[in-house]
Image: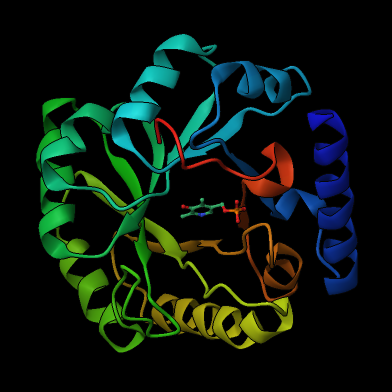
Amino acid sequence: MLKDNLKEVEKNIAQACEKAGRKREEVTLIAVSKTKPVSMLQEIYDEGIRTFGENKVQEMVEKYEEMPKDIKWHMIGHLQRNKVKYIVDKAVLIHSVDSYRLAEEINIQAKKHNVTVPILIEVNVAGEDTKFGVKPEETLQLAEEIAALENVRIEGLMTIAPFVEHPEDNRVHFRRLKQLSVDIASKNIDNVRMEILSMGMTNDYMVAIEEGATMVRVGTGIFGARNYGKAN
Ligand SMILES: *Cc1c(COP(=O)(O)O)cnc(C)c1O
């Protein structure tokens, strides 16, 4: 069953890439497995998926321990500074950096582990009160500040678009994030790359790909609806 979901998502990604004149390899699918049991992750793993996204530190660490070691784990959720130490050597990319203080803590922990941690700056493109993320107009300044941290490397930008009925309604936000990344890239700041655009979820990843997403984060489309009633 999950296999069929995955096939459908893969088909849609290929279609969106073709429509946009992009190569399939330009887009990484992140299987967002939050709240789902490892048995389901394993099912997708057996289909060849090696890239998973989690939004809670403890859950990611537990699954990291239980699942095969060739998985690339992405931290996509809001991160508290006191929990950075648990994932700094486990996440291949932290998508949700929206303050200098958080980046600073990542830098401290990264130094301890003698690693450089790739991060994205999370941008609240639609200006929603309920969302984390820095304002578009403050993104460049934050990037410049974080660039000074030796063991953190900015790889690009991430956004969580509003929940909308019509995915087309989010096109304007994806376009804005893309433009922002082009603007920041043009400044040629040392230690700042704008290679990654993490945008698009189950509801709107095809539109996001058309607008330049290089990573899409798909949960429901692969694993089915989440049940928050119980443990999570
Ligand atoms: C849960 C989550 C997703 C996946 O959402 P779906 O709509 O289930 O695809 C993507 N990104 C972030 C940051 C999330 O927390």
Q: Say if residue 127 shows up in the picture.
A: yes
**Viewer-closest of 205 and 104:** 205
* Image quarter in which the C terminus is found: top left
Query: Based on the displayed image, in which of its 4 quarters is residue 41 positioned?
Result: top right
Asked if residue 175 lies left or right of residue 210, the reply is left
53 lies above or below 208:
above
Where's residue 148, x and y in %?
15, 60
Q: Residue at x 69, y 29 (%)?
A: 49
185 lies above or below 25:
below
Asked if residue 146 lies left or right of residue 55, the reply is left
Query: Based on the displayed image, in which of its 4 quarters is residue 145 positioned?
Result: bottom left
**Viewer-closest of 165 and 230:** 230
Where's residue 76, x and y in %?
42, 48
Where's residue 4, x and y in %?
88, 35
Where's residue 117, x and y in %?
30, 41
Asked if residue 45 lies left or right of residue 66, the reply is right
